[in-house]
Image: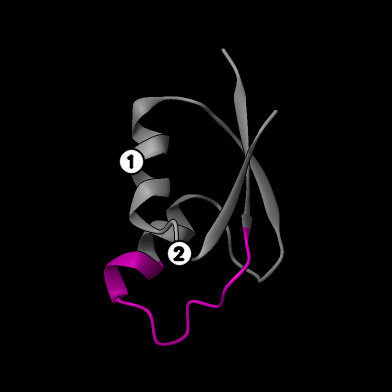
Amino acid sequence: MANLKVTLVKSTIGAVPKHKKTVEALGLKKLNKTVELPDNAATRGMIKQVCHLVKVEEV
């Protein structure tokens, strides 16, 4: 199974509280930080919710 490289490219200041918690649940705490996550339905759903805040690359 492939992995996804997710980078926080926009600040969560002023974002909807639910989106802030989703970004934190993805493991992103600071701007421009990157995490590798498994490519599954749960991860894809979380990314879709905050797609305006993150950049996604397939690894």
Q: Is residue 9 left or right of residue 42?
A: right
Q: Residue placed at 55% from the left, 78% from the top? A: 11
Q: Which residue is mark 2?
A: 52
Q: Nearer the viewer, mark 2 or mark 1?
A: 2
Q: Which span of residues is magenta-colored?
A: 8-20
Q: Position of residue 20 (x, y in %)?
A: 39, 69
Q: Between disc 2 and disc 1, whose residue precedes?
A: 1
Name which residue type carries label 2: His
Screen quadrant of the C terminus = top right
Find numbered disc 1 in the image and state the secondary structure of the residue it sits on.
helix
Q: Is residue 13 above or below residue 1?
A: below
Outermost residue, bottom side: 14
Q: Which residue is mark 1?
A: 45
Q: Position of residue 49 (x, y in %)?
A: 33, 54
Residue 57 lies in what quarter of the image?
A: top right
Task: Say if the magenta span includes residue 57.
Answer: no
